[in-house]
Amino acid sequence: HDTKTLWTRAAHGNKKSDLLVRRGFGVGIVGAVAETGVLSNVCEAYSHPRFDKSVDKDGITGFKSKSLLTAPVFDADGVVVAVVQLVNKIPKHERDARRVTT
């Protein structure tokens, strides 16, 4: 968390890609969640102003994002150290959001 950079390897199904995706805190939905520590539940990704279309557009993920449930992960001191994002989850949004935060 010292670098304020998030990174992930894109996955498609059960296959991990060698492509590394990096985003700074504050960039896109994932970055906003990292910066604020507040869960984000987006039902229509392309309609959200913070959605970073380049991950889909550049073919990194190999699919089109529709819904995004994005939550911060905190260390023992309450500092955001990671972000977890569920993509294209079958909607049960309110219940899923409660599960992720507990």
Image (cartoon, rainbow, N blue to C red):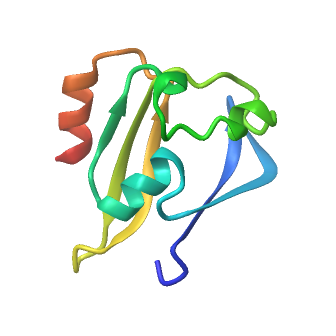
What residue lies at 79% left-to-right and 45% top-to-bottom? 17
17 or 56, nearer to the observer: 56
On screen, residue 89 versus residue 39, left or right, reads right
What residue lies at 55% left-to-right and 24% top-to-bottom? 46
Q: What x and y, as percent, mark residue 63? A: 70, 23
On screen, residue 1 versus residue 63, left or right, reads left
Q: What x and y, as percent, mark residue 35? A: 38, 63
35 or 87, nearer to the observer: 35
Indicate whether 8 appears above or below 58. Answer: below
Q: What x and y, as percent, mark residue 21? A: 70, 54
When asked about the image quadrant of residue 100, the answer is top left
Q: What x and y, as percent, mark residue 9? A: 69, 52
Residue reaching furthest to the bottom: 2
What residue lies at 44% left-to-right and 49% top-to-bottom? 84
What residue lies at 53% left-to-right and 20% top-to-bottom? 66
When asked about the image quadrant of residue 23, the answer is bottom right
